[in-house]
Image (cartoon, rainbow, N blue to C red):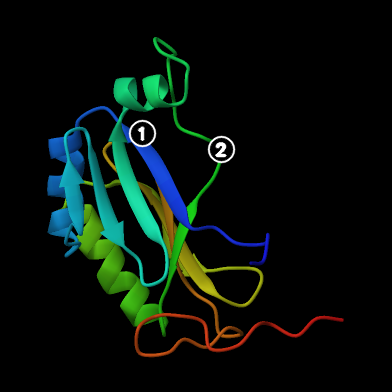
Amino acid sequence: MTPQRVSMITLGVADLDRAKAFYGALGWVPEQAIDSVVFYDLGGMKLGFFGLDPLAKDQGREGAALGVGAMALCQNFPDPAAVDAAFAQAEAAGATVLKRPEAVFWGGYSGYYADPDGHVWELAHNPFWPLDADGKFTQAPATE
């Protein structure tokens, strides 16, 4: 098994029901929900939302004040119009707009929003990384 992989991403949330409602408004369907955690299938990996206090306890840091990390999750789309449509859907669901989609210096098109817990999502079109019908990359970028 390769060490260069991610199997699951778990994000801490203040209100699990609010998180499920927000992502449900984006069309996400939970794969499994147990007590203070919900899991979504991402086609080969999982995304979980876990209540902040139970997550801290599970990490062995009971009582720790967990916050939002300095990172962005990204969804890629086949074209700028699809980015705009997904961004509008997120905004309608209650996302906080951080940066509206625009052409960017590296030749693509992207924008950023935060979910109700402050987790940052980038919605992007990268013309150098083609996608299949499921939104998965079909080839890696060329390296020098």
Label 1 sits on a secondary structure element that is strand
Determine the image quadrant of residue 133: bottom left
Q: What residue would you read off at disc 1? A: 12
- The residue positioned 56% from the left and 38% from the top of the image is 70
- The residue positioned 44% from the left and 53% from the top of the image is 8
Residue 115: percent from left, percent from top: 30, 44
Residue 50: percent from left, percent from top: 30, 36
- Decide which of tag 2 and tag 1 comes sooner along the chain: 1
Q: What amino acid is labelled 1 in the image?
A: Gly
Q: Nearer the viewer, residue 1 or 5?
A: 1
* Between marks 2 and 1 in the image, the one whose residue lies nearer the viewer: 1
Is residue 60 depicted above or below 9 in this figure? above
Quarter of the image with the N terminus is bottom right
Q: How many marks?
A: 2
Is residue 24 depicted above or below 48 in this figure? below
**Residue 116: mark in rendering:** none
Q: Nearer the viewer, residue 74 or 1?
A: 1
Left or right position of 74 against 21: right
Q: What residue would you read off at disc 2? A: 70
Q: Can residue 118 be seen in this snapshot?
A: no
Q: What amino acid is labelled 2 in the image?
A: Ala
| Direction right: furthest residue | 144
Label 2 sits on a secondary structure element that is loop
Residue 131: percent from left, percent from top: 46, 86
